Amino acid sequence: MKYKDILKKMTLEEKISLCSGVNAWQTKAMDRHGIPSLFMCDGPHGLRKQDIDGDNDMLGINASRPATCFPTAVTTASSWDTDLIGQIGEAIATEAIAYDVGLVLGPGLNIKRDPLSGRNFEYFSEDPYLSGKLAASFVRRAEEKGVGTCLKHFAFNNQEYSRFNSDSVMDDRTMREIYLAGFEIAVKEGKPSTLMSAYNKINGVHCSDSVMLLKDILRDEWGFEGMVVTDWGGMHDRIKAFKAGCDLSMPGGSDYMEKDVLEAVKAGVLSEEDIDACANRILELVFSKQRETKASYSFDEKGHHRLAARAAEQGAVLLKNEGILPLSENQSIALIGHMAGAMRYQGAGSSHINPTHIVNPIDAMPNASFAKGCDIRGNTDSALLSQAVKLAKEADVAVVFAGLPNRYESEGFDRDDLKMPEGHIRMIESVAAANPNTLVVLLCGGVVELPWIDKVKALLYMGLPGQAGGEAIANLLYGRVNPSGKLTETWPIKYEDCPSAGHFKGLKNAQYREGIYVGYRYYDKAGVKVRFPFGFGLSYTSFDYSNIELDGNRVRVQIKNTGDRPGAELVQLYIKPPQDGLHRPVKELKGFAKVMLEPGQSKSIDFLLDDRSFAVWADGWKIQKGTYTILVGPSSVDLPLSVTIEKDGHLLAAPSWQKGKWYESLEGRPSQEEWEAMLGRKHVEDIPKKGSFTMNNTMEEMRPHSLVMKLAYKRVEKNIIKFNGGKKDYDNPEFRMMMACSVGSPLRSMQISSGIRGELLQGLLDMANGHYLRGLKKILKRKK
Ligand code: BGC
């Protein structure tokens, strides 16, 4: 153990104490042992550095220092550009150094399982290979700068509803092929200093306690040597977590289970070596990444702003263009929509940045006329519409800005549906009726239904494009930059088309019934029509694909720019495995490359495949013997080049449960019985009951059964209403988030996140379970 000399001098109590932070953002300094404190902060799209003496929070509500707000992952991922994402990692690390931050809490790479998930904007893709490669690049470049990174949320954290204690129930193969594969790539190739254990459980065990996840897979199998930190308030059972190697509990301030740990060591239930191992990993991080506080802060604000603009340009996806784009400088343009003047450029929650500068579309297109068309909440009325229609009629081209106002998507809660606000739809339809040359710029963090798509001539999807979004939009619309982004998630026509629709919404425990059939893996095999397929995106030029060659494990293809503008093409490689035996998707992404080409220019591109490109999880990674087709092209549904390859390997017969089940045909919906057949066990929901409530239950769950919890709930709600200026406003994402993260979080998380010492919540819990006297004693003891 590297720090054994220090550890030897520390008391057991000190070592246990070191394994929790000291406040919202710092590890504990221990002067007596020469241990400094390390500062960490969010987040994936820029730095959210809060002053420790001011108001701090894990929800992005209180102030933070100015930092570059890069586009969120939904946008950067659509660039499919590992180098660009690496540059963003490096720039965020540079800002971290300027602000004396040693560890950046990102990137996030959970799989976009269902488009309703409130936090999808923070994640890269529905595809693990792509997510892993992008995250690895961010991590590598940031770590090279000497700043620690943190892959989050490890793992199986794919919904916001009940996020603190929902159980993600799934089979091993789904776990490995879909939800762990991206982390595996990012850990092995990126070598992050840390990972963040997710709030939820995996098959009944909290991620913070999971030996399977944190020890067997992460450390023993993947060779991860860094530190694991809990998500904020995510520590479940500190004793089990020490055994699993969940090193640091954040935020600090409470004494959650510290006494229990001490007693467990004394009773021989937990070994001191387990604690030493965790403390040693914390010391390694602190000593290698901690930064001294400097007097002044500076970084290249202009350069980083320009990088943010470039990222938004590269990540924008042109979804439709009937000859209207690019615009020409001598056309008269009307910009319509509240978001043209105040674009939505980032998401709410812990990734929320205080930007150094903002360029809105109207700033970047000063010669265009502008009408609001709707209000900030997405509502409209006849006055707003008639003004918009008037301007649209007067202009050569009308550009409508629409999408999702911030109350629709946020950390902390899931979306109700995939609909855009009615006001936005009315605005688009009225403007399109007034001017046939209407196009839409969409600003939202994920999929929306587009019932109006046939009424407009073009659609440019910006995602949440960061502080320089306006600049990027102008450059793309005028063709100063040629769009090259491609979707990293499928856009279904309607929510009901999704493979998880029917077993996602409102389920506390997440039933991963669709198994490995997430995103295009489902739509392809089920033959369900989609609005826009995975990997799709248009350009102002055109490309030709030719000459596929296979040489051992190397695939070479030729791409030519056949249009009259320079442009970048994103070349995708998929592999179609044998379709007999064990059920498989029709094809899976196994390679991609972005290539910049001048008009008429050709380049050849090489892809290197390895065993994992062909493997399936069947109690270990195995290659099924048979014929594989390698497909290359511009999107998951347009793959003009193909070549086959024979692979020797295992004969993986269909397991006995598979015959006639949904997983072979993907017809209709997977039933609970079919899913249980795949899981190999029955799934029973456990319903919280009075008498057996634990620190793992929420006030929300307990209040229908307990007067004490009803009162406590009211009290917390009252405080949040007060914080919110006296308004009980469930339309305000911050209000909803605060409720979800307090009364909707388990008592243990409330204790940790609020830094509560003593047994106040344990006392309330006893009372909720009917043990009033015992509970009261605990509460009073605390007061003494
Ligand atoms: C989020 C994390 C974040 C942490 C600290 C949590 O609520 O889930 O992603 O890093 O807060 O802000």
Image (cartoon, rainbow, N blue to C red):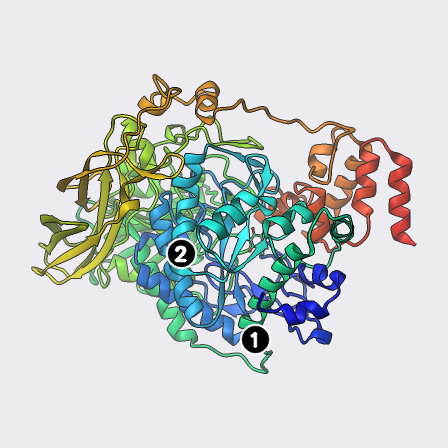
Name the quarter where the C terminus is drawn. bottom right
* Residue 137 coordinates in the image, percent (x, y): 37, 60
Q: Quadrant of residue 177?
A: top left
Viewer-side residue, 290 vs 272? 272
| Kind of element beneath mark 1 | loop
**Which residue in the structure is indicated by mark 2?**
188
* Residue 375 coordinates in the image, percent (x, y): 48, 48
**Which residue in the structure is indicated by mark 1?**
291
252 versus 163 height, above or below:
below
Numbered tag placed on residue 737 in the rendering:
none
Name the quarter where the N terminus is drawn. bottom right
* Residue 480 coordinates in the image, percent (x, y): 23, 64
- Answer left or right for 746 relative to 528: right
Confirm whether residue 234 shows in the render: no
* Residue 257 coordinates in the image, percent (x, y): 74, 50
Q: Quadrant of residue 627?
A: top left
* Amino acid type indicated by mark 1: Arg
- Going 39% across and 46% down the picture, which residue do you hit? 181
Query: Could you classify mark 2 by the number of other residues whose Cα lies within 10 Å: few (under 14), some (14-19), or many (20 or more)?
Result: some
- Answer left or right for 197 relative to 550: right
